[in-house]
Amino acid sequence: MSSFKRKAKSQKGKRFLDNRAPKLIENEKGCLFLKGPSTSDLITKLLRDLHKLKGVKSHMFARRNMTRPFEDASSMEFFSQQNDTSLFCYGSHSKKRNNNLVFGRLFNHMMLDMLEVEASNYKSILESSGDRKTLVHIGSKPMFVFLGEEFTTNPEFKLVQDYMLDFFQGEIVQEVNLAGLKRVITCTALNGVIHFKHSAIRMKKSGTRYPKVELEDIGPCFDMKIRRVKPAEPEVMNQAMKLPVCFCFFSTLSLSLSLSLYVCMYVSDSVSLSHIDLD
């Protein structure tokens, strides 16, 4: 890890660096979508649909890139720093690995871990019968459903679950308007394959107090089969899981103040009780 620390020369630069500084509640993670030296029609359309599904803070490169993340991660780290993103999705196609997708996460613009899958049975947004106007709105958050015991027993499937949440959960908020929950992402693990489906929620009249809920396919939908996994190194993961120093300081300070207040209340009550007994 580089020990170089940038210093701001203006108030605007200070605000820019403060926005990138570690926080207890992180900003919404940006994502970079890019194509490899060669891609199939399926991968090109799938990257475009995932870029639309991600919504805000999503960047997609139009040109192809002569890079392979599993062999050399320096290019992805450079792109991450230039575009201020901590996630990336890389698509490629070759005879050895056809319809290939690589999902990756970075910490402090350094590679954290990667996941490589094979995409198949793809259904685009344009091919779906649902209303595309409900796809993504600014501030909208999807619901997630993970079906299958593999998501709790298999570490690789658990990693896929973490990736889907990091990519599409959006900004972390304290309150959610239930009227804005209009779509759901369903991941079903069956026979070693993960079925990804994006649906819209329709509430129709049922003649009772509660509406009839139906799911309407709005795309994209595709299947994923895990090929390779590059786990995070323990030292890097420990650094990524650390809380900011300022939060630890204020937590310790608040705890010490609470204990001091409790001791003062206890002492004052003891003095008042002893005073009563003496009288």
Image (cartoon, grey):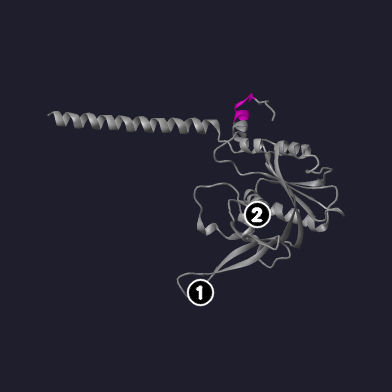
User: x and y percent of residue 238 in the render?
Assistant: 61, 37
Q: Which residue is drawn at 57% across and 67% down?
A: 202
Q: Which labelled disc corresponds to residue 206?
A: 1
Q: Answer whether residue 88 is visible to the viewer in this image.
A: no
Q: Which amino acid does label 1 sit on?
A: Ser
Name the residue that disc number 2 marks: 154
Which region shows up in magenta? Answer: 7-14
Q: Residue 12 colored magenta?
A: yes
Q: Which amino acid does label 2 sit on?
A: Asn
Q: Which of 131 and 119 is in front in this view?
A: 119
User: x and y percent of residue 215 in the render?
Assistant: 60, 67
Q: Which residue is drawn at 69% across and 68% down?
A: 129
**Side of 172 where 130 appears, left or right:** right
Q: Which residue is drawn at 15% across and 31% down?
A: 277
Query: How busy is the neighbourhood of tag 2: few (under 14 within 10 Å), some, or many (20 plus)?
Result: few
Circle 2 SS class: loop
User: x and y percent of residue 144 in the render?
Assistant: 59, 57
Specify the quadrant of the image occupied by residue 77: top right
Q: Answer whether residue 251 is visible to the viewer in this image.
A: yes
| Alpha carbons under labels 1 and 2: distance apart | 40 Å
Circle 1 SS class: loop
Q: Residue 73 colored magenta?
A: no
Of the residues tagged 1 and 2, which is closer to the observer?
Answer: 2
